[in-house]
Image (spheres, rainbow, N blue to C red):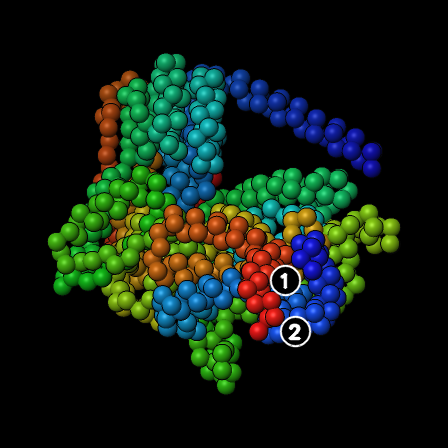
Amino acid sequence: MTADSTSGGGRETGGPETLPAPVQPEEQPGRLNRIRLGLARFAPFLGAAQGYIGLVLVIAVGIITKGQYFWNQTNLSNAVTAFASRGILAVGVTLVILTAGIDLSVGSVLGIGSMTAAMLLVHQNLSPWLIVPASALVGAFFGLCNGLGTTVLRIQSFVMTLAMLSVVRGIDRQMSGNVAVGTALLDQNGHPTPRAEQFSLLGTPGRTLFQGTWLPLFGRAGIGYPVLAFVVVCIVFQLVLTKTRFGRHIYAVGGNPTAARLSGVNVTLVIVAVFTLSGLLAGFAGPIDAAYSASADPLAGTGYELDAIAAAVIGGASLAGGKGTITGTFVGALILTLLDNVLGLNSVSANLQLIIKGLIVVVAVVLQRPGFFRSIADPLVRLLRRPHPSGS
Amino acid sequence: MHAVRRYLIAAVALATAAAFGSGCASNAPSSSSLGGQFVVGYSQSNNAEPYRAQLNLQLQYYAKQHSDLKLLPITDAHQDSATQVSQVQNFIQQKVNALIVSPNEPAPLTAAVQQACAAKIPVIILDRSVNTDCYSAFIGGDNYGIGKLAGQAAVQALPHGGNVVELQGILSDQPQIDRDKGFRDAIAGRNITIIDAQEAKWLKANANTIMQQWIAKGDKIDLVYSQNDDMALGAQLAIAGAGKAGQIQIVGIDGLAIPTGGIRAVQQGLMLTTFVYPTCAPQAVDTLEKLLHNQSVDKKQILGTTQVTKDNAAQLYRQYDMSGKVG
């Protein structure tokens, strides 16, 4: 059993642990073993549940230190809004990571998405209904370039997207002339124009869709477009990964590209599609970022790729590919954003925040290991069992 | 696949050759005062900051007013000192008649400025200093003084004292340190408390998030002191989002005459006041002219500031606006 649990720390947590468990109670009946049996049965879920432990911890710290100032809808909604655009990037990055690739260009693509959005608003006076798809398409184009670069030109994705990070940022800065484009347009009377008003809704945490409705969580402070967009993106792509053939192909390509190819998966197509989707999502997140700060900065999104990758990794994605979920990434993003919020509410200095955030990534990854809790729990159980061999 | 690759290699080779060719071509004519024109190189530390973008525009504008000045394309060091050193050295190689440098950091650029000095090229340093005396003129603003004025504006706005929060630039930046110190010195003993200060790295989005957190904490906040206007406007978004517009005053610094800048914001009533941090461009061009015509110049020029209020905002905007003036 112990030998099993250490060796069973690989990909299939469920298999080796659930099988021997039923044999156990016959040898040593007792409460301890019933708990153990329960644990063993839950082991496969625990792998996913470990991510939630961090989330619960962060929330607990928030509530203990700041109470209602932390745990109220306005604050939580603000906190998630601040991270929503990076959260959406994280979903795209997760897709790429699942195929054992990496996308470093998402921050720059978000930047060009936000610049596109602001320029379309200011110069063309388009409605958000057109601006958002247009920005997403711009992003998708650069994603497609990444995909073609990694497959057709056979450049490693790290290198290809690193180059794209630079190229896209250059284009962004060139087209903006290094000047931020403000989106808070005013008419002659000094009131915001209707289009600018609509656009600002894309990034505002407070005002929104469900405000004043009966919905218990959404009704009071309102859930803004950024949070909604983030959640919907997560749900859609989690469903794509689990319920569609394309989703299974993504895991297959990441797990073992050769095997995937031999079993008839078009590996090139999957990789190109995944990069394009990552770019699409980054472009889609652009307008949110622009609306959030009421302007598109030529430097917007710098460094966001690292937050996005951190969210995916904390959520359990493995850079080796084939392992990870969007729900995990969602939880990872929540951990990062709430951590940021809790630290901010407690006036922790910026330097200390950097240290803490870095350590959290390491701790989270260690906790995510399937065998981690068993390796601590098993010796403890054995220790407890020794004085009372009968188990009562 | 291989064919594609071969074409690519050929294309890259061609492009490199073209780049070298054009590089040499542009080197040749700028070797020294051509056709009675003085060739001037300007090394900018980072084009992507609004203040520096505005400085570039103004410098191009004022240089164009003088027919005997030929400003080479402005180089951008992307906030990297090593890049800037090599760009300055390139200008020295091209034997420009004069050099303007906005150093990214004092220490790394010192050697490059000394090289220019050794090559008998007059150097004008803008905004941030270098650790040598071997330059012709230094022109800059007074961050400490502006911080102090901002503090006095806060004292004026809160005659009975109150709670202030401070949005800071990157903590290691000298302007951050000076603007912080000036403000704190000015409010000392005036019953004003800085209840929170946090690094927002000069950025609007960060300031928005931090301000939301401060409001969420429920402390009474009377005034926001932001070390630049971008962060001030980020805080303004958070304040407006929380429905507290008008209850919390905002004081900024920079006062750029761009649509997203502080002068417009004061004019629109989004901020209480801001202070123009001088771009130094007109003074730089003046000094340049004097240097090139062998006239004497002040070696150290510390420029004053102008407080932007609702009354003078429109006029200041017209004065400093560069849109449409540079082709």
The quadrant of the image that shows the N terminus of chain A is bottom right
Q: Are marks 2 and 1 on the same chain?
A: yes
- Residue that badge 1 annotates: A47
Q: Secondary structure at mark 1?
A: helix
Badge 1 local density, few (<14 within 10 Å), some, or many (20+)?
Answer: many
Question: Which is nearer the eye, A382 or A224?
Answer: A382
**Which chain's residue wears label 2?**
A
Q: Residue drawn 38% across and 56% down?
A: B207
Dot 1: chain letter: A
Q: Which label's residue is closer to the chain start, 2 or 1?
A: 2
Q: Can you see residue B123? A: yes
* Quadrant, the C terminus of chain A: bottom right
Q: What number is the disc on residue A29?
A: 2
Q: Is residue B326 above or below residue B204?
A: above
Looking at the image, is A383 positioned above or below residue B25? below
Q: Amino acid at mark 1?
A: Gly
Query: Which secondary structure lies at badge 2?
Result: loop
